[in-house]
Amino acid sequence: MSTSNETSIDVNISEETSGESSAIKGIKLSLYAIIFLISVIGNTLVCVVIARRRRMRTVTNFFVLNLAASDLAITCICIPFDIPVQENHHKWLYGKVLCKLLYPIQTMAVFSSIFTLTAVSLNRFWAIVYPLRKQMTKKHAFVVIVVTWVVCALLTVPYVVVLNLNETTNYCEENWPGIEYRKAYTASLFALQYLLPLCMITIAYLKIGLELRTCVNVKRRYSVNSVLHNARRNEARKVVRMLIVVTLLFAICVLPNNVMWLWLDFGNGASYSKFWDMVAFTNIILFANSAANPIAYTICHENFREEFKLYFTCDPKIFQSMAESTITYTRSRLRSLTGQDKNISQTVEYNEILITDEVLIVDAKETVI
């Protein structure tokens, strides 16, 4: 859930936020700065690497690119604009037009980020559990991304309609026809931004974990040699660990902010003196997810680590080493398939991947993350 619902208020915020101590304010601003730097640098590197390196332009990386773009939007829109508003006791500083647009854009970016995480999990589920069936192509991924943004925009339309600048109080407020409408929208956001995506991601990753651990099924389906089978098992452990971390990050970072708005609309959160201080820190946790995503999805991955080195070093030997190692690895992996079942080889070449989204089997054109 985005920070957008903080405009839905019926209390004197200025009185509550004015009591914020300088120590708390300093900690809050420091955390904002750290998250902003990590998110901007990390997600920008992701975008640059995928855009400039042909071998990184895979189906999975297209989703990672969209995730990075969503996280950049959250970081660059939420933090710079929200801090002045918070420091000015939530008085709106940007006029009527931005009152209608700013928070909905934030909400849309949060939707896109979470929907992208869901799409990545479903894509990996399909590639791992049903590797012999038709797989998603780059064109399919592009269509999914476009549809995702369209759906995100549609889900924020009600929010755009009810947002208005109160010229008397100078607050950017939600003017719903009744409290029940606001509650319904808050509950819908919680379901669509947290419950449903988390359930889908959890189920997908559980099935992936079960598939990766079912050694008997692997042997029966692919009849691979022991070397490749052992490599698959080792990669399986790494993938499962990464998926668990990603799921936990998603659940931990998004839940507190959702709970606060549910407490506000369905409980007595507004009567608690430190409510808005708590909201400020749940916002920080939410923003931290944008900084954690490039770390969890890319920086910890060998391909991205190697690509990032190229942007932090000027040593031409690294460029040469990267090119040679990629060619050698691809050729050796292709040679390892010699003598195996011809149908399996053809399936590998067509789908680009048999077992995981990690680099186990690649063709001569591009590496699959």
Image: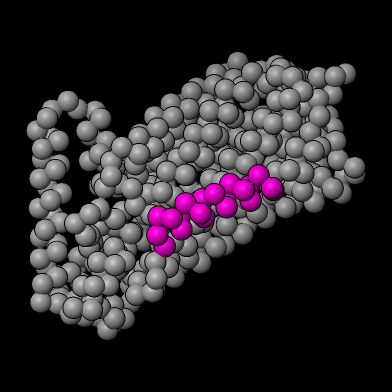
**Could you tell me what secondary structure mostly forms the magenta stretch?**
helix
Q: Which colour style is shown? A: one colour
Most extreme residue toward the front, as rendered?
139
The x and y percentages for residue 360 are 23, 61
Q: Say which quarter of the image contains residue 97.
A: top right
Which residue corresponds to the image point at 84% horizontal and 24% vertical from the top-left? 166
Q: Quick check: is 253 in the magenta stretch?
A: no
Q: Considering only vertical position in the picture, is 234 above or below 323?
A: below
Q: Say which quarter of the image contains residue 192.
A: bottom right
Q: Considering only vertical position in the picture, is 74 above or below 336?
A: above
Q: Which is more toward the observer, 279 or 82?
A: 82
- Give the magenta-colored segment's residue range: 136-155
- How many marks on residues? 0
Q: Considering only vertical position in the picture, is 79 above or below 285?
A: above
| Image side of residue 250 versus residue 230, left or right | right
Q: Which is more toward the observer, 122 or 204?
A: 122
Q: Is residue 270 visible?
A: no
Which residue corresponds to the image point at 77% horizontal and 23% vertical from the top-left? 96
Which residue corresponds to the image point at 26% horizontal and 47% vertical from the top-left? 55
